[in-house]
Image (cartoon, helix red, strand yellow):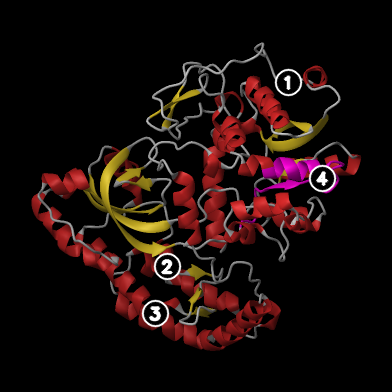
Amino acid sequence: MKKGLFLTVLACFLILSACQEDKLPETEVEHVDDGEDSQEPDETTETLTGPLTASDYDELWPDTTKLVWIVSEGATSGVDPEIFKQFNDLLIEKGANFVVEFIGKDTLDVENYQKEIREMKATGEQVDLLDTGFGTETFYTNIAAVEDDLLEPLDSYFQTDDGEKLFNQFDEKAWESASVEGSHYGLNPYPILSNSIYLFFNQKMADTYDIKLPDELEHLGQAEDVLKLLSANKDQDEVVPLYIGHLDYKELSGYDFLENGIAAGYNDNGNPYVFNPFEQSNVTNLMETLAHYAQQGYLLKDEEDEEEVEEMISQGNFFAYVSQASPMSYSSDVLDMGSYSFEVVGYKLADDFVTKRLNWINAIASWSEHKDEAFQLFTLLNTDHELSNLLYHGIKGKHYTLVDGKIAPGDDDSQRTPGYYSPANEMLTYPVGHEPLNKEEVYKEWNKNSRMSPIAGFELDDSEISIDLEAIKSIYEKYDSLWTGDELDVENQLVKANEELQEAGIDQALDEINQQLKNWWDSKD
């Protein structure tokens, strides 16, 4: 779990840290077809020349309650203020008796942002909704916000008509993943709750060298026959035979892991349990395969050449590629890799789990004097296509047009749109890039079929464990090269590792952890 959190925070940090202040990127937009190739700009009122001010709110919406929503600064910095004006006009048109001011903060600056939010509560400064912000490997902002009484519980609202509508808009796992001690304060805003691990073959490369790809492929070891065919046809220096993208190799196993290296999965009865991964046959087979591929030169692993390898991949000079993917990036036999995409044949190797979302949710501030209106706004934004599209992609005809059911950028690129940073429900927005036209339907089905991690929400009580878990953790770390294909003699190293784990008391530790896990699981019913 710690691994999943760290990778998520790191990925988000890398994305957002490069996109602040005046360096925030232009938002690319794409969308659902309304039957025309393009649209004329919507009629707008007098164009605003700067951010909405307090006097603007008084003049534009007199005698109307104003809510305040603290969001990531990426949702407001350099954003066309006309978007926020039209958003508030649309709220009124849809029957709301309030408008909203979005105030951007540097939610990446963990220490200062968390301090600022708590000072706002202490001084009674108006905040009606807020972004809990990013955390660290040891500081989880959602949990800390609940412990410091910053968030209003939503459970009672779910008994209302609006609450039922909001709850049903999302998969139950979206709510569960963001819950704290069984209560709901916000939701996991990502449209896709989990990824799957795929092995992709470059279709162009297969066609070029007349390599017949298998009809089915269930695990990485079954790829050797086609890798041999490539090796016989092309020099390895000219093409990447097989590359494993930015993921923890342990994810290839299809299991989740405790911080001490012990694996977790579901048994045949659907109940969670933990076990020693070094004694699991499918795990040891995976280790053997990775080591064999590395020794044969199929798997490129030299980190010193990582930049060069990724450059070759970006140019399409690769044959096989292992990566996380979902319908957001892999659709209609096309793999979207950001700034480039390729026709591929994909084989699912493993499903990732839905894990706990410990940071960065939108929630209602506990000291808000307009909690009911804040919940109504939360519901409207997350259930209304028009509102989400406007707050994500901007104004149709100005910031984008629709072409073949997807968004094409508009002519006016002088000001940004909130895009990725928006608190809008991205599932309701028009499709971008290679997203499917019926993205909401596809994403909901994908999320429906996803599974919560068997240890999502489980807190191990170390004081009840008689075995030194740190010793077990150090042994798993000592033999970490078994996971990465760097170990030449996998069989003998596994024997040594398991002997050391036995001496450290792995069996007793598993018994005690599994008992805690069973008690926790039974208590959820």
- Residue bearing the label numbered 1: 52
- Labelled pair 4, 1 in contact (Cβ < 8 Å): no
Going by the numbered disc 1, the residue's amino acid type is: Leu
Q: Which residues are magenta?
A: 357-379
Task: Please tell me whether mark 2 sits on a helix, a strand or a loop.
Answer: loop
Marked residue nearer the N-terminal end (4 or 3)? 3
Marked residue nearer the N-terminal end (4 or 2)? 2
Going by the numbered disc 4, the residue's amino acid type is: Lys
Foreground disc of the pair 4, 3: 4
Task: Please tell me whether mark 4 sits on a helix, a strand or a loop.
Answer: helix
Foreground disc of the pair 2, 3: 2
Is 374 included in the stretch rendered in magenta? yes
Residue 14 can be seen in this image: yes
What distance separates the C-alpha of mark 4 from that of mark 3? 51 Å
What distance separates the C-alpha of mark 1 from that of mark 2? 49 Å
Q: How many marks?
A: 4
**Which residue is located at x 58 percent, y 61 percent?**
173
Location of residue 111 in the rendering, given as x and y in whole percent from the top left corner: 72, 44
- Residue bearing the label numbered 3: 280
Rendered image quadrant of residue 122: top right
What distance separates the C-alpha of mark 4 from that of mark 2? 42 Å
Going by the numbered disc 2, the residue's amino acid type is: Gly
Q: Is residue 428 above or below residue 488?
A: above
Circle 1 residues within 10 Å: few <14, some 14–19, many ≥20: some
Side (left or right) of 224 relative to 327: left
Task: Please tell me whether mark 3 sits on a helix, a strand or a loop.
Answer: loop
